Amino acid sequence: MKIKKVLNSSVVLAVNDQNQEFILLGKGIGYGKKAGTTLESNSYNQVFVPVSNGNVEQLLTSIAQSSPKLIEIAQKIINYATDSLNTKLSDALYVSLLDHLKFALEREEHGIVITNKVYWEIKTYYSKEFSVGTYAVKLLNQEMGTKFSDQEASNIAAHIINAENGSDDRRDALKASQIIGRIVNIIKYQFQGGINDSAPNFQRCIVHIKFLIERIIADNMFENDDPAIFAIVKSKDEQAFQIAQKVSDYIKIKFGEPLTDEELMLMTMQIQRIDK
């Protein structure tokens, strides 16, 4: 590895023999060093972050303004999220998470508490991502001496959700959580409280709603391929179809257009299963 740029005394941008860029962290790794200096492998023993995304400049700026300890914590959180969720996360997560952690520490230092308005929704409908947030909070409290609560876990979970969806805009996760909660309440209200929240069919319906909202936000709703099948599903259970229609009406209010016939049919089928 050779240094390409010194970010601070503990962080450098380096390249290998294949001209691939990496961010290397180690105590004193950049102290007194210049571009072109060769680094031994034992000089970057804290964190090793490959750079292969379009947010390199943002990432370099964030890292240069962060302590090596906080960068290491961010890396541990991302590694834990990748392993526990078993999915590839957007490279933009490095920037958004590190910036969020720095801001969270500043808030904590000044005693500023921000309540997450969709805490319950994220905890309930994104339980795996929320568990990553819980891990992150525990790690922060242990390593930084903070006293973050589960509220902060839901904030971090929002970044993980967006990274799964390829977005670096935290508002998407918050918006999705609010809408999912509202749709679930619409369905539960129509059943007049007669739904077992832990029933497998109801849980499958929630998963379907999550993916539906992701498709809507991405402007990628399923299109209707067979009007005949749609008509059969509609006639099979009029009550389920009417509930699905109420969901579609709500979607139109939030996004400006209702569900496509294909999405309406799939929602009807999910609601039909809840009652079984």
Image (tube, helix red, strand yellow):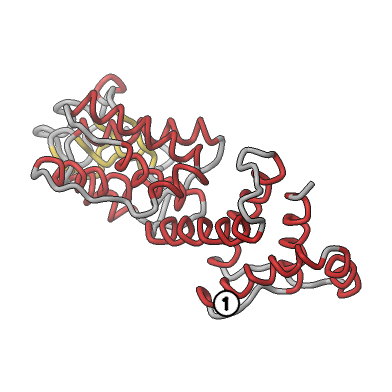
Q: Residue sitting at 71 percent across and 67 percent down?
A: 263
Position of 200 relative to 138 (above/below): below
- 47 left or right, relative to 166: left
Extreme residue in the bottom direction: 256
Q: Residue sitting at 28 percent across and 55 percent down?
A: 58
What amino acid is at disc 1? Lys
Position of 159 relative to 169 (above/below): above
Position of 207 relative to 179 (above/below): above
Q: Residue sitting at 44 percent across and 62 percent down?
A: 175
In percent of width and height, residue 136 lies at: 34, 33
Q: Nearer the viewer, residue 74 or 221?
A: 221
In percent of width and height, residue 214 lies at: 56, 60
The quadrant where residue 133 appears: top left
Locate the N terminus and report the quarter of the image it occupies.
top left
Q: Residue sitting at 61 percent across and 75 percent down?
A: 249
The quadrant where residue 146 appears: top left
Secondary element at tag 1:
helix
Q: Which residue is mark 1?
A: 252
Q: Nearer the viewer, residue 57 or 132?
A: 132
